[in-house]
Amino acid sequence: MIERSTLRMAPVEQLPHLLRLLDDDTPAVRKAVVEHLEALGDRLGPALDSMPEPPAEGQLELIGQLLLPAKQRRLEEKWEAWLRSEGNPRRLEKAMELLSDFLGSPLRRRRLGEALDRLAAEYRLNEPQPEVRSLVSFLFLAKGLRGAQVDYYRPENSDLLQVLERRQGLPISLVILLLLVARRLDLKVEGCNFPGHFLARFQEGKELVLIDCFHEGRFLDLQELTQLYPKSSQTIRTIARLATPTEAIVARVLRNLIRAFQQVGQAESQGAFLESLLRKLEGHQRRWERNHQKAQWQAIHPLFWPGSLVRLAESDRRGVVVDLDPEFKGPRPGRDAAVTTSKQPWYHVLIDDGTTIQYLPEESWQADSLRTPIRHPLIPYFFSGFEGGRYQRNGLAWPRD
Protein backbone atom coordinates (compact mmCIF):
# COMPACT_ATOMS: atom_id res chain seq x y z
CA MET A 1 0.00 0.00 0.00
CA ILE A 2 1.24 3.50 -0.87
CA GLU A 3 1.71 5.68 2.19
CA ARG A 4 -0.04 9.01 2.04
CA SER A 5 3.14 10.54 3.39
CA THR A 6 4.61 10.17 -0.10
CA LEU A 7 2.52 13.19 -1.04
CA ARG A 8 4.96 15.32 0.98
CA MET A 9 7.83 14.51 -1.42
CA ALA A 10 9.09 16.94 -4.11
CA PRO A 11 6.51 17.15 -6.96
CA VAL A 12 8.56 15.57 -9.79
CA GLU A 13 10.10 12.88 -7.57
CA GLN A 14 6.70 11.80 -6.29
CA LEU A 15 5.14 11.42 -9.74
CA PRO A 16 5.36 7.58 -9.84
CA HIS A 17 3.67 7.46 -6.43
CA LEU A 18 0.99 9.90 -7.55
CA LEU A 19 0.18 7.68 -10.52
CA ARG A 20 -0.37 4.73 -8.16
CA LEU A 21 -2.69 6.88 -6.07
CA LEU A 22 -4.88 7.87 -9.02
CA ASP A 23 -7.37 5.08 -8.26
CA ASP A 24 -7.74 6.12 -4.63
CA ASP A 25 -10.96 8.17 -4.57
CA THR A 26 -10.69 9.02 -0.87
CA PRO A 27 -11.51 12.78 -0.84
CA ALA A 28 -8.37 13.79 1.10
CA VAL A 29 -6.07 11.73 -1.17
CA ARG A 30 -7.82 12.84 -4.36
CA LYS A 31 -7.51 16.49 -3.28
CA ALA A 32 -3.79 16.12 -2.50
CA VAL A 33 -3.10 14.32 -5.78
CA VAL A 34 -4.81 17.06 -7.76
CA GLU A 35 -2.92 19.79 -5.89
CA HIS A 36 0.42 18.15 -6.57
CA LEU A 37 -0.36 17.51 -10.23
CA GLU A 38 -1.42 21.14 -10.62
CA ALA A 39 1.79 22.27 -8.90
CA LEU A 40 3.82 20.66 -11.67
CA GLY A 41 2.23 22.99 -14.22
CA ASP A 42 4.06 22.94 -17.58
CA ARG A 43 6.57 20.43 -16.19
CA LEU A 44 3.94 17.69 -16.01
CA GLY A 45 4.10 16.67 -19.68
CA PRO A 46 7.91 16.36 -19.89
CA ALA A 47 7.99 14.61 -16.50
CA LEU A 48 5.42 12.01 -17.59
CA ASP A 49 7.19 11.58 -20.91
CA SER A 50 10.56 10.92 -19.26
CA MET A 51 9.34 8.25 -16.83
CA PRO A 52 11.01 4.82 -17.23
CA GLU A 53 7.55 3.27 -17.29
CA PRO A 54 5.26 5.61 -19.24
CA PRO A 55 1.74 6.06 -17.85
CA ALA A 56 -1.01 3.88 -19.27
CA GLU A 57 -3.69 5.39 -21.48
CA GLY A 58 -6.24 5.05 -18.69
CA GLN A 59 -3.96 6.93 -16.29
CA LEU A 60 -3.50 9.76 -18.77
CA GLU A 61 -7.25 9.98 -19.24
CA LEU A 62 -7.80 10.12 -15.48
CA ILE A 63 -5.12 12.81 -15.08
CA GLY A 64 -6.92 14.82 -17.75
CA GLN A 65 -10.21 14.48 -15.88
CA LEU A 66 -8.64 15.47 -12.55
CA LEU A 67 -6.94 18.51 -14.04
CA LEU A 68 -9.96 19.66 -16.07
CA PRO A 69 -11.27 22.18 -13.48
CA ALA A 70 -7.80 23.75 -13.19
CA LYS A 71 -7.43 23.89 -16.99
CA GLN A 72 -10.82 25.55 -17.24
CA ARG A 73 -9.88 28.15 -14.64
CA ARG A 74 -6.62 28.95 -16.43
CA LEU A 75 -8.30 29.25 -19.81
CA GLU A 76 -11.06 31.43 -18.36
CA GLU A 77 -8.46 33.85 -16.95
CA LYS A 78 -6.50 33.95 -20.20
CA TRP A 79 -9.73 34.34 -22.21
CA GLU A 80 -10.52 37.59 -20.45
CA ALA A 81 -7.09 38.93 -21.41
CA TRP A 82 -7.54 37.72 -24.99
CA LEU A 83 -10.88 39.52 -25.30
CA ARG A 84 -9.11 42.78 -24.47
CA SER A 85 -6.38 42.25 -27.06
CA GLU A 86 -8.06 43.98 -30.03
CA GLY A 87 -5.56 45.08 -32.63
CA ASN A 88 -3.07 42.32 -31.86
CA PRO A 89 -1.94 40.88 -35.25
CA ARG A 90 -1.56 37.47 -33.55
CA ARG A 91 -5.08 37.57 -32.10
CA LEU A 92 -6.39 34.59 -34.08
CA GLU A 93 -3.27 32.51 -33.42
CA LYS A 94 -3.42 33.29 -29.71
CA ALA A 95 -7.04 32.13 -29.47
CA MET A 96 -6.25 28.88 -31.27
CA GLU A 97 -3.18 28.38 -29.06
CA LEU A 98 -5.32 28.79 -25.92
CA LEU A 99 -7.85 26.26 -27.19
CA SER A 100 -5.12 23.85 -28.29
CA ASP A 101 -3.45 23.99 -24.85
CA PHE A 102 -6.83 23.36 -23.23
CA LEU A 103 -7.71 20.40 -25.47
CA GLY A 104 -4.26 18.78 -25.44
CA SER A 105 -3.06 15.70 -23.60
CA PRO A 106 -0.94 16.03 -20.43
CA LEU A 107 1.92 14.55 -22.50
CA ARG A 108 1.83 17.29 -25.11
CA ARG A 109 5.15 19.11 -25.41
CA ARG A 110 4.82 20.95 -28.74
CA ARG A 111 3.44 24.47 -28.93
CA LEU A 112 1.31 25.66 -31.81
CA GLY A 113 3.56 28.58 -32.73
CA GLU A 114 6.60 26.32 -33.00
CA ALA A 115 4.75 23.88 -35.27
CA LEU A 116 3.63 26.72 -37.55
CA ASP A 117 7.15 28.16 -37.65
CA ARG A 118 8.50 24.78 -38.80
CA LEU A 119 5.87 24.49 -41.53
CA ALA A 120 6.68 27.96 -42.86
CA ALA A 121 10.43 27.26 -42.76
CA GLU A 122 10.01 23.94 -44.58
CA TYR A 123 7.97 25.63 -47.31
CA ARG A 124 10.59 28.35 -47.74
CA LEU A 125 13.33 25.79 -48.37
CA ASN A 126 11.81 25.00 -51.77
CA GLU A 127 9.98 28.27 -52.42
CA PRO A 128 12.24 31.29 -51.78
CA GLN A 129 9.56 33.49 -53.40
CA PRO A 130 6.36 32.55 -51.55
CA GLU A 131 3.02 32.74 -53.31
CA VAL A 132 -0.44 31.53 -52.35
CA ARG A 133 -0.99 28.78 -54.91
CA SER A 134 2.28 26.99 -54.17
CA LEU A 135 1.65 27.31 -50.42
CA VAL A 136 -1.77 25.68 -50.86
CA SER A 137 -0.15 22.88 -52.86
CA PHE A 138 2.48 22.42 -50.15
CA LEU A 139 -0.02 22.17 -47.29
CA PHE A 140 -2.81 20.16 -48.91
CA LEU A 141 -0.91 17.97 -51.36
CA ALA A 142 2.71 17.65 -50.21
CA LYS A 143 1.90 17.65 -46.47
CA GLY A 144 -1.36 15.75 -46.98
CA LEU A 145 -3.69 17.93 -44.91
CA ARG A 146 -7.28 17.03 -45.77
CA GLY A 147 -10.86 17.19 -44.59
CA ALA A 148 -12.05 14.78 -41.89
CA GLN A 149 -14.45 12.48 -43.69
CA VAL A 150 -15.16 10.23 -40.68
CA ASP A 151 -16.08 11.44 -37.16
CA TYR A 152 -16.40 14.96 -38.53
CA TYR A 153 -17.25 16.56 -35.19
CA ARG A 154 -14.53 14.98 -33.07
CA PRO A 155 -13.01 17.60 -30.73
CA GLU A 156 -9.56 16.75 -32.14
CA ASN A 157 -10.62 18.20 -35.50
CA SER A 158 -10.71 21.67 -33.94
CA ASP A 159 -7.33 21.44 -32.16
CA LEU A 160 -4.75 22.72 -34.65
CA LEU A 161 -1.88 20.68 -33.19
CA GLN A 162 -3.91 17.49 -33.45
CA VAL A 163 -5.00 18.47 -36.96
CA LEU A 164 -1.31 18.70 -37.92
CA GLU A 165 -0.52 15.38 -36.22
CA ARG A 166 -3.49 13.51 -37.71
CA ARG A 167 -3.38 15.38 -41.05
CA GLN A 168 -7.13 16.01 -41.04
CA GLY A 169 -9.57 18.53 -39.70
CA LEU A 170 -12.70 20.61 -40.24
CA PRO A 171 -12.87 23.16 -43.07
CA ILE A 172 -12.35 26.05 -40.67
CA SER A 173 -9.40 24.36 -38.91
CA LEU A 174 -7.63 23.80 -42.21
CA VAL A 175 -8.31 27.38 -43.34
CA ILE A 176 -6.92 28.76 -40.07
CA LEU A 177 -3.73 26.74 -40.55
CA LEU A 178 -3.39 28.20 -44.04
CA LEU A 179 -3.99 31.74 -42.72
CA LEU A 180 -1.42 31.42 -39.93
CA VAL A 181 1.29 29.94 -42.14
CA ALA A 182 0.57 32.52 -44.87
CA ARG A 183 0.97 35.32 -42.32
CA ARG A 184 4.49 34.06 -41.53
CA LEU A 185 5.29 34.33 -45.23
CA ASP A 186 3.78 37.82 -45.65
CA LEU A 187 1.05 36.45 -47.89
CA LYS A 188 -2.45 37.90 -47.63
CA VAL A 189 -5.00 35.12 -47.29
CA GLU A 190 -8.32 35.66 -45.50
CA GLY A 191 -11.18 33.59 -44.18
CA CYS A 192 -14.54 33.49 -45.97
CA ASN A 193 -17.41 32.75 -43.59
CA PHE A 194 -19.39 30.71 -46.11
CA PRO A 195 -22.41 28.92 -44.61
CA GLY A 196 -21.82 25.26 -43.83
CA HIS A 197 -18.32 25.16 -45.30
CA PHE A 198 -15.69 27.71 -44.28
CA LEU A 199 -13.43 28.81 -47.16
CA ALA A 200 -10.26 30.84 -47.65
CA ARG A 201 -9.89 33.64 -50.18
CA PHE A 202 -7.18 35.76 -51.75
CA GLN A 203 -6.91 38.39 -54.43
CA GLU A 204 -5.14 37.39 -57.65
CA GLY A 205 -4.84 40.50 -59.77
CA LYS A 206 -8.41 41.77 -60.10
CA GLU A 207 -9.94 38.37 -59.42
CA LEU A 208 -11.15 37.07 -56.06
CA VAL A 209 -10.12 33.41 -55.72
CA LEU A 210 -11.67 31.09 -53.13
CA ILE A 211 -9.94 28.04 -51.65
CA ASP A 212 -11.71 24.90 -50.44
CA CYS A 213 -9.13 23.58 -47.96
CA PHE A 214 -11.33 20.62 -47.02
CA HIS A 215 -10.98 19.19 -50.54
CA GLU A 216 -7.19 19.30 -51.02
CA GLY A 217 -7.02 23.07 -51.48
CA ARG A 218 -9.33 23.24 -54.49
CA PHE A 219 -9.44 26.70 -56.11
CA LEU A 220 -12.80 28.24 -57.02
CA ASP A 221 -13.61 31.51 -58.72
CA LEU A 222 -16.68 33.49 -57.79
CA GLN A 223 -18.52 32.52 -60.96
CA GLU A 224 -18.11 28.81 -60.19
CA LEU A 225 -19.43 29.35 -56.68
CA THR A 226 -22.50 31.27 -57.81
CA GLN A 227 -23.27 28.58 -60.40
CA LEU A 228 -23.56 26.08 -57.54
CA TYR A 229 -26.26 28.29 -55.97
CA PRO A 230 -27.97 30.04 -58.92
CA LYS A 231 -30.99 31.20 -56.88
CA SER A 232 -28.74 32.87 -54.29
CA SER A 233 -26.07 34.42 -56.52
CA GLN A 234 -26.48 37.93 -55.04
CA THR A 235 -26.15 36.59 -51.50
CA ILE A 236 -23.16 34.41 -52.43
CA ARG A 237 -21.35 37.35 -54.00
CA THR A 238 -21.96 39.44 -50.90
CA ILE A 239 -20.68 36.72 -48.55
CA ALA A 240 -17.58 36.14 -50.68
CA ARG A 241 -16.68 39.86 -50.46
CA LEU A 242 -17.18 40.10 -46.71
CA ALA A 243 -14.24 40.45 -44.39
CA THR A 244 -14.39 37.79 -41.67
CA PRO A 245 -13.17 39.23 -38.37
CA THR A 246 -11.16 37.14 -35.95
CA GLU A 247 -14.06 37.11 -33.49
CA ALA A 248 -16.38 35.51 -36.07
CA ILE A 249 -13.80 32.81 -36.82
CA VAL A 250 -13.20 32.01 -33.15
CA ALA A 251 -16.96 31.96 -32.43
CA ARG A 252 -17.46 29.43 -35.22
CA VAL A 253 -14.62 27.25 -33.83
CA LEU A 254 -16.24 27.35 -30.38
CA ARG A 255 -19.64 26.34 -31.79
CA ASN A 256 -18.02 23.38 -33.56
CA LEU A 257 -16.33 22.32 -30.31
CA ILE A 258 -19.55 22.64 -28.31
CA ARG A 259 -21.34 20.41 -30.79
CA ALA A 260 -18.43 17.94 -30.77
CA PHE A 261 -18.47 17.58 -26.98
CA GLN A 262 -22.23 17.19 -27.02
CA GLN A 263 -21.88 14.29 -29.45
CA VAL A 264 -19.25 12.51 -27.35
CA GLY A 265 -21.32 12.83 -24.18
CA GLN A 266 -19.34 15.66 -22.55
CA ALA A 267 -21.94 18.41 -22.86
CA GLU A 268 -21.87 19.19 -19.14
CA SER A 269 -18.16 18.90 -18.40
CA GLN A 270 -16.79 20.55 -21.54
CA GLY A 271 -19.64 21.84 -23.72
CA ALA A 272 -21.13 24.07 -21.01
CA PHE A 273 -17.73 25.59 -20.23
CA LEU A 274 -17.06 26.39 -23.89
CA GLU A 275 -20.54 27.88 -24.16
CA SER A 276 -19.56 30.28 -21.35
CA LEU A 277 -16.50 31.35 -23.37
CA LEU A 278 -18.70 31.89 -26.42
CA ARG A 279 -21.16 34.00 -24.41
CA LYS A 280 -18.29 36.15 -23.13
CA LEU A 281 -17.02 36.64 -26.67
CA GLU A 282 -20.48 37.59 -27.95
CA GLY A 283 -21.08 39.91 -24.98
CA HIS A 284 -17.72 41.61 -25.56
CA GLN A 285 -18.64 42.16 -29.20
CA ARG A 286 -22.05 43.63 -28.35
CA ARG A 287 -20.46 46.11 -25.94
CA TRP A 288 -17.91 47.11 -28.58
CA GLU A 289 -20.70 47.56 -31.13
CA ARG A 290 -22.74 49.79 -28.82
CA ASN A 291 -19.71 51.97 -28.06
CA HIS A 292 -18.54 52.39 -31.66
CA GLN A 293 -21.53 52.01 -33.94
CA LYS A 294 -23.62 55.14 -33.41
CA ALA A 295 -20.57 57.38 -33.73
CA GLN A 296 -20.19 56.04 -37.26
CA TRP A 297 -23.56 57.37 -38.43
CA GLN A 298 -24.67 60.02 -35.94
CA ALA A 299 -23.49 62.93 -38.14
CA ILE A 300 -25.96 61.81 -40.83
CA HIS A 301 -29.05 62.13 -38.58
CA PRO A 302 -30.79 59.23 -40.34
CA LEU A 303 -34.43 58.33 -39.83
CA PHE A 304 -33.49 54.63 -39.59
CA TRP A 305 -30.47 52.84 -38.13
CA PRO A 306 -28.86 49.49 -38.95
CA GLY A 307 -31.15 46.92 -37.36
CA SER A 308 -34.34 48.95 -37.98
CA LEU A 309 -37.24 47.13 -39.61
CA VAL A 310 -38.56 49.07 -42.60
CA ARG A 311 -41.13 48.73 -45.34
CA LEU A 312 -41.18 50.12 -48.87
CA ALA A 313 -43.64 53.00 -49.06
CA GLU A 314 -46.95 51.87 -50.53
CA SER A 315 -45.75 48.26 -50.65
CA ASP A 316 -45.85 45.11 -48.55
CA ARG A 317 -42.12 44.47 -49.07
CA ARG A 318 -40.37 44.68 -45.72
CA GLY A 319 -36.78 44.25 -44.62
CA VAL A 320 -34.05 45.26 -42.18
CA VAL A 321 -31.50 48.04 -42.63
CA VAL A 322 -28.02 46.51 -42.74
CA ASP A 323 -26.03 49.64 -43.66
CA LEU A 324 -26.48 53.23 -44.85
CA ASP A 325 -24.67 55.98 -46.73
CA PRO A 326 -24.96 59.74 -46.08
CA GLU A 327 -25.90 60.13 -49.76
CA PHE A 328 -26.10 58.00 -52.90
CA LYS A 329 -22.87 56.03 -53.45
CA GLY A 330 -23.97 53.25 -55.77
CA PRO A 331 -23.45 52.85 -59.51
CA ARG A 332 -27.08 53.84 -60.14
CA PRO A 333 -30.29 54.20 -58.13
CA GLY A 334 -32.40 51.11 -57.56
CA ARG A 335 -35.06 50.54 -60.17
CA ASP A 336 -37.83 51.05 -57.61
CA ALA A 337 -36.59 54.50 -56.63
CA ALA A 338 -37.30 57.80 -58.30
CA VAL A 339 -34.05 59.53 -59.21
CA THR A 340 -33.47 62.17 -56.58
CA THR A 341 -30.90 64.91 -56.28
CA SER A 342 -31.70 65.81 -52.69
CA LYS A 343 -29.05 64.92 -50.15
CA GLN A 344 -30.48 62.19 -47.95
CA PRO A 345 -29.33 58.87 -46.51
CA TRP A 346 -29.42 55.79 -48.74
CA TYR A 347 -30.09 52.43 -47.13
CA HIS A 348 -28.91 48.90 -47.85
CA VAL A 349 -31.87 46.72 -46.85
CA LEU A 350 -32.17 42.93 -46.67
CA ILE A 351 -35.62 42.11 -48.03
CA ASP A 352 -37.76 39.53 -46.25
CA ASP A 353 -38.41 36.02 -47.59
CA GLY A 354 -35.71 35.85 -50.25
CA THR A 355 -32.15 36.85 -51.10
CA THR A 356 -32.83 40.38 -52.40
CA ILE A 357 -30.82 43.40 -51.21
CA GLN A 358 -32.32 46.83 -51.99
CA TYR A 359 -30.38 50.11 -52.09
CA LEU A 360 -32.84 53.02 -51.97
CA PRO A 361 -33.09 56.56 -50.53
CA GLU A 362 -34.67 57.41 -47.21
CA GLU A 363 -37.83 58.77 -48.85
CA SER A 364 -38.56 55.27 -50.20
CA TRP A 365 -38.87 53.70 -46.74
CA GLN A 366 -41.18 53.87 -43.77
CA ALA A 367 -41.09 52.16 -40.38
CA ASP A 368 -42.43 48.61 -40.40
CA SER A 369 -45.26 48.10 -37.92
CA LEU A 370 -45.06 44.30 -37.72
CA ARG A 371 -41.88 44.28 -35.58
CA THR A 372 -41.35 40.57 -36.31
CA PRO A 373 -38.16 38.90 -37.62
CA ILE A 374 -37.48 38.66 -41.32
CA ARG A 375 -36.01 35.76 -43.29
CA HIS A 376 -32.84 36.39 -45.26
CA PRO A 377 -29.65 34.29 -45.52
CA LEU A 378 -27.42 37.26 -44.59
CA ILE A 379 -29.10 37.90 -41.22
CA PRO A 380 -26.63 35.73 -39.18
CA TYR A 381 -23.67 37.46 -40.84
CA PHE A 382 -24.58 41.01 -39.86
CA PHE A 383 -26.75 40.72 -36.77
CA SER A 384 -26.13 39.19 -33.36
CA GLY A 385 -29.75 38.96 -32.19
CA PHE A 386 -33.33 40.22 -32.38
CA GLU A 387 -35.00 41.96 -29.47
CA GLY A 388 -37.76 44.51 -28.98
CA GLY A 389 -38.72 44.61 -32.65
CA ARG A 390 -35.24 45.36 -33.99
CA TYR A 391 -32.05 43.53 -34.85
CA GLN A 392 -28.74 44.04 -33.04
CA ARG A 393 -26.14 44.90 -35.68
CA ASN A 394 -22.71 43.32 -35.17
CA GLY A 395 -19.37 44.87 -36.11
CA LEU A 396 -18.98 43.24 -39.54
CA ALA A 397 -18.52 45.92 -42.18
CA TRP A 398 -20.81 45.95 -45.22
CA PRO A 399 -18.73 45.31 -48.38
CA ARG A 400 -18.04 48.50 -50.29
CA ASP A 401 -16.03 47.32 -53.28
Image (cartoon, rainbow, N blue to C red):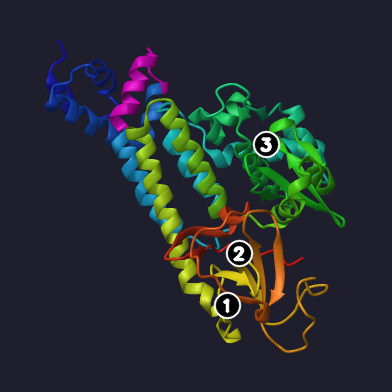
Image quarter where the N terminus lies is top left
| Residue 90 visible in the displayed image | no
When the figure is inspected, residue 137 is found, relative to residue 14, above or below; the finding is below
Quarter of the image for residue 367 reads bottom right
Range covered by the magenta-colored residues: 49-67
Q: Secondary structure at mark 2?
A: strand
Q: Quadrant of the C terminus?
A: bottom right
Badge 3 is on which residue? 119
> Residue 64 in magenta?
yes
- How far apart marks 1 and 3 lie (CA) works out to 41 Å
Q: Earlier in the sequence, mark 2 or mark 3?
A: 3
- What's the residue type where badge 1 is placed? Gln
Q: Residue furthest top?
A: 1
How far apart marks 2 and 3 lie (CA) works out to 47 Å
| Residue 146 on the magenta segment | no
Foreground: 287 or 345? 345
- Give percent across and percent down for residue 36: 24, 31
- Residue 274: x and y in percent read 40, 42
